[in-house]
Image (tube, helix red, strand yellow):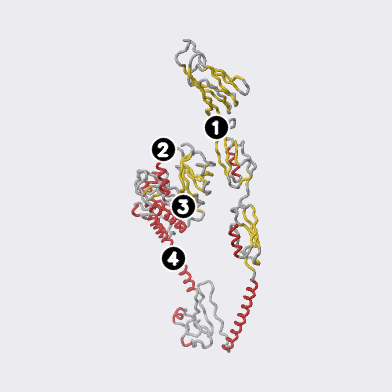
Amino acid sequence: MPLTPDLSGRALDDRYELHAVIGEGAFGRVYQGRDRRLARPVAVKVIKPWWTEDPDWVGSFEREVQLLARVSDPGIVQIFDVGHADEGLYYVSELVDGENLASRLRRGPLPPWEACALAAQLCRALAHAHAQRIVHRDVKPANILLSSRGRVKVGDFGIARLAEGSTDGAPATIVGTPKYMAPEQGRGRPTTPATDVYSVGVVLYEMLAGRPPFTGDSAVELALRHLQEPPPPLSVRLAPALTQIVDRALAKDPAERYADGAEMAQALVQARRQASVNQRNRIAYGRKRTASHGRVTALAPVAPAASMPPAGADGRDWAGVRGGPASPSATALAPRQPPRPRGRVTTIPPRGPDPTRPAAPMSPRRNVNPPARRRAAAALGLALLLLASMVIAAVLLGRTGHTRVPALTDLTRSAATAKARRRHLHTVYSARYDTAVAGTAIAQRPRAGARVKDGATVHVLLSRGPAPVEVPLVVGEGSTDARAALTQLGLHSTVSQVPAPGISPGTVTTQSPTAGRNTAAHSSVALTVAETPQWRPLTRFAGSQSVAFRIRGTRWRVVYQMAYQGTCTFIFFCSGPSARVTNLGTGSTVNQFGLDDGTGQIKTYRSGPGLYQIKVSPGGDNARWSLEVEDYY
């Protein structure tokens, strides 16, 4: 297979900048790019050139992009544009900031309910496509993108088809990834939304187990295992509801699976909700058991009824409950022991970590005067109320003419000014270079929350954006080294090839901005690079014309055509036209030759750049002739 050229540094249709390669598949290479017109980051997929040589494939590709553009859902990577530039066929989509699920799974399996949540998001996204009769047919971790905000984005609907067949009338075409392919897909049968459900089941199995259910050394072996073998059982520690969802999604018969992504998403959400309810019930039950186990009753030893004193006779309770006799149940639980001296209590320690201690004897009865206590409490409350009123009044009086400084950081200048005015504060601004967005407040003095007088001044520091970068001199360097030097300084580059006589191919001939100038960080520097020399037509003349021309390359050539009109004057000798080549700069003759040799003859010269002229003498016989000069650079 031929190599695909790296187009980094170019701009498709003078709009979409290609910065760096972020992925590659069978059909194309994906670049991180930037839309110049809308000033936003994008992903650009450029189709490999040998695919575009097939007109039928190009027509199918255009239909696929139109099909994908119909799907608009937050969980599906959106298509923005499609085009055909000089570099090839391409389409533009949103750029997802994050990683794909395949990269995440290389670090190990996911926690069960995190995997359940991701699968539910994936199913909801596919449900939107299924509602429009679109089947993805290649659901796999590499096509599931995880954004930095934890959202799932389904990408690469490149082999999607309508649910009842392909867009090109070939429903039996086998496409997809064997490791995640449904049994009916491996047989080449028509696909339905249940086909995607099977692939989601394989992905969910891999998220839970850390490996897909089936592996093999070949695509045929994998397809047979999907067709004939049941998946290995998942861990018994997983919730039964979750394993049941995986088993149903991986059913061999599409009719036994969930009908589409919406039904499977509902099952996943219900399983997660039920797990949360069960967990809350377990926590509540555990607290209840802990509270019940913490109660400990001191039990008296069993003694003959005749020797047991009446409850409360000596100020103590033999059953551990003050003022009442021992309960029959407590007595029945006590072990048979010999009688103990009166006044001693034996306790059974609790099963918890802290045993209950016997309560101290009751203190002697004191005489109290409830009305007096109520009067004293009322007087104390009144005094506290007066004191609180005085404190509040002092605070309110102290606040007169003062305000608190609001938080102004991360606001634009206009927003910070408006917020400060609402607190009757003035703002004074200064600026410095910073990584924050230009015009955003990055610091303030006084700090947020400080108390100041009305009309006070708040000094706000704004960001000027990243510091400008001095453009280095890269003219005369190879394009690869020049672009590496610019990238090291945080600058992007665009490259265009131009004819450059006398300069080695791949050498930078001009740059814009020029060396020594300051430019904004992350801006682009346009480079022109000498292209490989080739023969280029310069001038053409015939008859009695004689034209001066300037040669730019190190060599050049004359291609001439000549034919006699009728017969020659002399039978054995023809007097045809002849040409003289003159260097007008030096006045010297470079060469002189006759045109008698006929048609398609070439004369090559290595006299180098300069101003030249060719004069043709007609000769004695009538002839038609023409000359074309070609320069090599």
Asked if the residue under mark 1 is in contact with the one under mark 4, i.e. CB atoms within 8 Å, the reply is no
Task: Identify the residue at horizontal 50%, vertical 48% (top origin).
Answer: 42
- Which residue was labeled with disc 4? 277
Between residue 511 and residue 4, name the one nearer to us: 511
Task: Identify the residue at horizontal 48%, vertical 85% (top origin).
Answer: 324
Q: Amino acid at mark 1?
A: Thr
Q: Secondary structure at mark 3?
A: strand
Q: Amino acid at mark 3?
A: Lys
Q: Disc 1 or 2, which lies upstream in sequence?
A: 2
Q: Disc 3 or 2, which lies upstream in sequence?
A: 2
- Which residue was labeled with disc 1? 532
Between residue 189 and residue 570, name the one nearer to us: 570
Mark 4 residue crowding within 10 angstroms, few (<14) / some (14–19) / many (20+): few
Task: Identify the residue at horizontal 64%, vertical 68% (top origin).
Answer: 402
Cα separation between marks 4 and 2: 57 Å
**Residue 242 screen position, x and y as percent:** 41, 58
- Which residue was labeled with disc 2? 54
Residue 595 visible in this rendered orientation of the protein: yes
Q: Disc 1 or 3, which lies upstream in sequence?
A: 3
Mark 3 residue crowding within 10 angstroms, few (<14) / some (14–19) / many (20+): many
